[in-house]
Amino acid sequence: MNRIFYALMVVATLASCAQSYNIQGSTSVSSLDGSKLYLKAVQEQELQNLDSCDVIHGKFKFSGTLDSVSFVSLFMGDESIMPLVLEEGEIEVRIDGASQKVSGTPLNDELYQFIDLHNQLDNQLSDLSHRQSQMMLDGIDENIINEQLSREAAIIAHREDSLVTHFIIDNFDNVLGPGVFMIMTSGMPYPMLTPQVEEIMSKATDTFKNNAYVSAFYRTATDIQKEQQGLTDPEPVGEPADSTIQNILNGK
């Protein structure tokens, strides 16, 4: 009897130590009302559903237990809406017409501080086109306009690359580093070793290098570069097939 009681106590203790997450969401986007939302993450080389809920009167909620902290995305159907970190605590999600915000837990707060800074730089780039139109209306020579705005665009682009690079480096050993690396590289036509990727990998910790997505991306990008430079003898390589690109982006 004492052994049974002890076993039950151990189970109860382990259960009480299990991490749990609670997401409280709200939206002012009327088209989301009545929709089903999903939390998805790359697991075992596939994008898998972790949880789902319905949007009712602008409100939605996810909750459950955690085996580990995860970098996930909020989806509506097959459309990714926003990234977030699934971690212990009370997570607040807000979706408006022009913005998305996640807050309430440490990694989500850090992620969206970074996203806010990145959006500010994107807005500065977008503003250059408006300034170009205004400068042309003011009668400024087109060559002068292009030279000035190209110089400003290059400065903003450098700041953006630096922001992303340093954020990933600062978060090598938690889910934010690999997660933002995935976002950064998903826009590439195929895995490639850009100077930014090379800088990140030259400083990477073993934890970051051994992440499933990072490892697969870097290995494939290295192989493609070798083949393009004629350092290997396989069949000629141009851009990889769409299915190959998708497999890499999904962690395969």
Image (cartoon, rainbow, N blue to C red):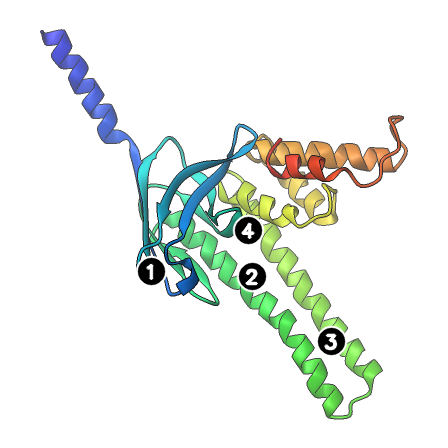
The kind of secondary structure element at disc 3 is helix
Q: Nearer the viewer, mark 3 or mark 4?
A: 3
Identity, as a three-letter code, of the amino acid under mark 4: Phe
Q: Which residue is mark 4?
A: 167
The structure residue drawn at horizontal position 71% and vertical position 43%, both measured from the top left corner, is: 198
Q: Position of residue 233 (x, y in %)?
A: 89, 26
Query: Residues under labels 3 and 1: Cα distance?
Result: 42 Å
Q: Position of residue 52 (x, y in %)?
A: 38, 42
Identity, as a three-letter code, of the amino acid under mark 1: Gly
Q: Which residue is mark 2?
A: 118
Q: Residues within 10 Å of mark 3 (few under 14, many from 20)?
A: some
The structure residue drawn at horizontal position 43% and vertical position 44%, both measured from the top left corner, is: 38
The kind of secondary structure element at disc 2 is helix
The structure residue drawn at horizontal position 24% and vertical position 27%, both measured from the top left corner, is: 15
Q: Nearer the viewer, mark 3 or mark 1?
A: 1
Q: Position of residue 91 (x, y in %)?
A: 34, 50
Q: Residues within 10 Å of mark 2 (few under 14, many from 20)?
A: some
Is the residue under label 2 in contact with that under label 1 (CB below 8 Å)? no
Q: Which quadrant: the N terminus?
A: top left
The kind of secondary structure element at disc 4 is helix
Is the residue under label 4 in contact with that under label 1 (CB below 8 Å)? no
